[in-house]
Image (cartoon, rainbow, N blue to C red):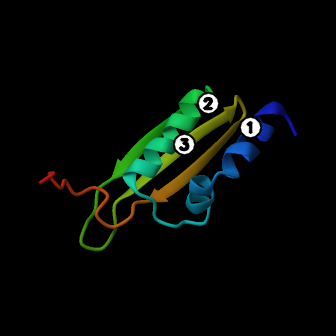
Amino acid sequence: MDGGDNLMAALYSNDIFRRILTNQPVSLADFNLVTGLLVYNNIPYDVSFDSATRKLAPALQLTVRINPTRTEVLVVPLAPGSTAFTPSP
């Protein structure tokens, strides 16, 4: 195991990462925590967003570049209501 594997193992032990890995929906706020952890640990990543349709729920695709030869692609289903704007009272 190299340093990148050790770092990813530590990140994947996080509850939010475990939910993503088991394809459980996460809130947009939780996803922002994930990207914050990646930035904090200097791990490069890309994000793409697929909007909801009548047949498909909205989802994010997170591409994490662990090292120059290894990339992980995670599909992140969003929890219901995560993309709806709800103004404060």
Say the numbered circle drawn on residue 39: none
Residue at left offset 63%, top offset 59%: 18
**Distance from Cα at disc 3 to Cα at disc 2:** 11 Å
Spot occupied by residue 86 in the image (x, y as percentages of width and height): 18, 56
Say the numbered circle drawn on residue 7: 1
66 vs 29: above or below: above
**Distance from Cα at disc 2 to Cα at disc 1:** 9 Å
Are circles 1 and 3 on residues that touch, CB within 8 Å?
Answer: no
Q: Earlier in the sequence, mark 1 or mark 3?
A: 1
Residue at left offset 52%, top offset 44%: 34
Question: Which residue carries the number 3 mark?
Answer: 63
Amino acid type indicated by mark 3? Thr
Residue at left offset 46%, top offset 51%: 30
Q: Position of 3 compared to 21: left or right?
A: right
Q: Earlier in the sequence, mark 2 or mark 1?
A: 1
83 vs 37: above or below: below
Taking the view exactly as shown, the residue that stands out farthest to the bottom is 55
Amino acid type indicated by mark 2? Ile
14 vs 71: above or below: below
Spot occupied by residue 33 in the image (x, y as percentages of width and height): 49, 43
Q: Residues within 10 Å of mark 1 (few under 14, many from 20)?
A: few
Quarter of the picture holding the N terminus = top right
Taking the view exactly as shown, the residue that stands out farthest to the left is 89
Q: Position of 15 compared to 47: left or right?
A: right
Describe the element under mark 1 as helix, strand or loop. Answer: helix
Say the numbered circle drawn on residue 43: 2
Q: Residues within 10 Å of mark 3 (few under 14, many from 20)?
A: some
Residue at left offset 44%, top offset 43%: 32
